């Protein structure tokens, strides 16, 4: 059995059952994070209203823009309407407005406690974030989507396979979002201006995900740039999969790229974490 | 009155000095705020460059409308003090302190915060207006420029009124403050585009319930010399200052009802 270390470098290779317990623990942490969000019921209702309202504004804008036009950038008016509904539904799932929990834990020094737990620090935060994402998918995204579809009559996917691909791309997007935000938040360890950095990284994420304007409407040079970056996995890719605009080999290539980005970001995130822990040990914690 | 103004500037000065203690953070947040809020401007630019026009308005005209709305909104955010994010004051019980001090509550609310990072939105709104003026090359007389100033100030006052109403909501349910976002951030987003592109129900809300259309869209119709697609008489454009002042006074009156309703969290 492989040697296992916790974040402070202590060996915790005891025996097999410990490892099983630890994977259950992450599920437990995710469930707790899910429950924590469940407490804010009124806030969630207000959030659904807000997402629906912003969706309505986007839809009005697209409807007016498309008047007298057919396809633009591969989308017609009903595609654009559907795009707006799904983008609003995915905003909170993908944490598009950012999430400062980790950087605040770093700034306040709370991570010392987190690091001394016999848990993998990276997986610990991943579990917290995924619990949050599942909550927002079920209680924010799904209702916003259903209400939006009923009021504004978006398109439905062609078949069950499309739904399946849509969900897989949401899962990939959620993981991409977490792994990227972990790196951005970790920078708080080296700078006191974490908020400035997070504003910047968040702007990139929001825009190049396609949350603000569909990447389909970007000017050619900007579209090329956006398609070379991984952020579109958070909105543009799932929505285009849903609309049936990405299929077959093209889709396989895009999803493959996303998985490669995901692996890279996990490795970078873990490397940054390693540096952080080293610094922390040098300073004496 | 003079005493009051002196005190106002001293208290705002205090907030500015306290914000400037973290100079590097201030710069980073200012730039960050400019970029994040600038995305709205980028959206206008990307869409209008691709589609050429929206509801008969060109890129330059929409950018003018957008810039005016963004400048008004940023001024409101800047001067509205702790009416913004007020739900946190209720949750933490901080509002008790305000009630105990020997100064008018509203005065304390308006001077309780002066978030300098909001200059970021102001800056990008100003840049948008600069772009609009370069493209439009308006031939305005002094009256036009003055009226434009009134339009911006009226918009700011009107958005402040919405912030005050949103804060009032927190007395009943602090969690519901996100509903207020519909009218603050949502209002700003919506008024960035000409009002006639929206469906009737959306338009009615922002014409009759929260009459933002009168402080933004109608004055812009006059300044850009465009006809009203709804055929209202021309003088409607000039109602902006009246409506803004009435909205602000109304919001303060409702806020006072909320204050009477306030029960401390007891923490």
Image: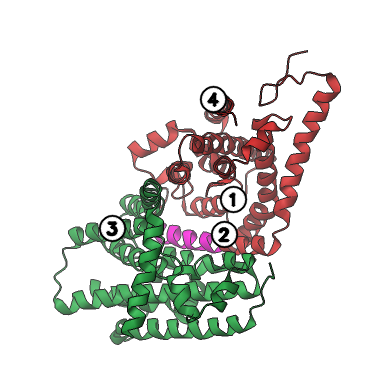
Chain colours: A red, B green
The total number of labels drawn is 4
Residue A82 location in percent, x, y? 55, 52
Task: Tell me which residue sits at (44%, 79%) in the image.
Answer: B211
Of pointers 1 and 4, the one earlier in the residue sequence: 1
- Disc 3: which chain? B
* Mark in the foreground, 2 or 4: 4
- The local crowd at label 2, few if under 14, some if 14 to 19, many if 20 or more residues have their Cα within 10 Å, is many
Which dot marks residue A275? 4
- Disc 2: which chain? A
Residue denoted by label 3: B128
Q: Secondary structure at mark 3?
A: helix
Which dot marks residue A92? 1
Residue denoted by label 2: A51
- The local crowd at label 3, few if under 14, some if 14 to 19, many if 20 or more residues have their Cα within 10 Å, is many
Of pointers 2 and 1, the one earlier in the residue sequence: 2
Alpha carbon of mark 2 to alpha carbon of mark 4: how far?
39 Å
* Mark in the foreground, 2 or 1: 1
Q: Secondary structure at mark 2?
A: helix
Alpha carbon of mark 2 to alpha carbon of mark 1: how far?
9 Å
Task: Tell me which residue sits at (47%, 59%) in the image.
Answer: A58
């Amino acid at each position: 059995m492989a040697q296992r270390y916790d974040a402070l470098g202590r060996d915790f290779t005891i025996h097999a059952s410990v490892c099983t317990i630890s994977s259950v623990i992450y599920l437990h942490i995710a469930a707790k994070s899910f429950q924590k969000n469940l407490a804010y019921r009124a806030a969630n209702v207000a959030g659904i209203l807000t997402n629906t309202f912003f969706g309505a504004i986007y839809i009005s804008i697209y409807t007016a823009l498309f008047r007298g036009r057919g396809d633009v950038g591969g989308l017609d008016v009903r595609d654009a309407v559907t795009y707006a509904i799904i983008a609003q539904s995915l905003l909170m799932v993908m944490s598009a407005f950012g999430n400062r929990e980790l950087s605040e834990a770093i700034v306040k020094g709370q991570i010392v406690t987190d690091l001394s737990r016999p848990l993998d620090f990276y997986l610990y935060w991943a579990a917290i974030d995924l619990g949050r994402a599942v909550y927002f998918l079920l209680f924010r995204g799904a209702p916003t989507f259903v209400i939006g579809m009923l009021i504004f009559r978006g398109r439905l996917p062609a078949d069950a396979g499309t739904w399946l691909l849509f969900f897989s791309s949401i899962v990939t997007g959620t993981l991409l979002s977490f792994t990227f935000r972990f790196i951005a938040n970790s920078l708080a360890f080296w700078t006191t201006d974490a908020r400035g950095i997070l504003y910047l990284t968040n702007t990139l994420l929001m825009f190049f995900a396609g949350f603000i304007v569909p990447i389909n409407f970007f000017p050619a040079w900007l579209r090329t740039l956006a398609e070379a970056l991984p952020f579109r996995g958070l909105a543009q890719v799932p929505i285009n999969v849903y609309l049936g605009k990405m299929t077959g080999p093209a889709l396989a290539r895009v999803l493959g790229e996303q998985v490669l980005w995901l692996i890279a970001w996990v490795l970078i995130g873990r490397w940054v974490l390693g540096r952080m822990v080293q610094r922390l040990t040098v300073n004496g914690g | 009155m003079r005493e009051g103004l002196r005190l106002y500037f001293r208290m705002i000065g205090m907030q500015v000095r306290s914000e400037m203690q973290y100079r590097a953070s201030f710069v980073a947040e200012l730039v960050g705020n400019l970029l994040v809020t600038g995305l709205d401007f980028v959206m206008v630019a990307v869409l209008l460059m691709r589609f050429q026009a929206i509801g008969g308005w060109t890129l330059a005209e929409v950018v003018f409308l957008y810039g005016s709305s963004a400048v008004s909104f940023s001024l409101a955010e800047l001067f509205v003090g702790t009416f913004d994010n007020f739900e946190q004051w209720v949750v933490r019980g901080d509002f008790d302190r305000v009630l105990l001090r020997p100064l008018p509550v509203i005065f304390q609310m308006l001077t309780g915060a002066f978030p300098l990072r909001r200059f970021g939105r102001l800056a990008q709104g100003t840049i948008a207006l600069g772009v609009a003026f370069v493209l439009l090359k308006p031939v305005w007389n002094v009256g036009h420029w003055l009226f434009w100033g009134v339009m911006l100030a009226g918009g700011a006052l009107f958005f402040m009124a919405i912030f005050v109403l949103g804060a009032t909501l927190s007395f009943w349910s602090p969690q519901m403050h996100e509903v207020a976002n519909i009218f603050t951030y949502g209002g700003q987003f919506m008024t960035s585009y000409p009002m006639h592109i929206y469906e009737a129900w959306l338009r009615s809300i922002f014409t009759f319930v929260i009459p933002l259309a009168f402080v933004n869209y109608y004055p812009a119709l006059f300044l850009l010399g465009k006809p009203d697609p709804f055929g209202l008489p021309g003088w409607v454009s000039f109602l902006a200052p009246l409506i803004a002042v009435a909205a602000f006074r109304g919001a303060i009156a409702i806020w006072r009802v909320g204050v009477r309703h306030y029960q401390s969290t007891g923490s």
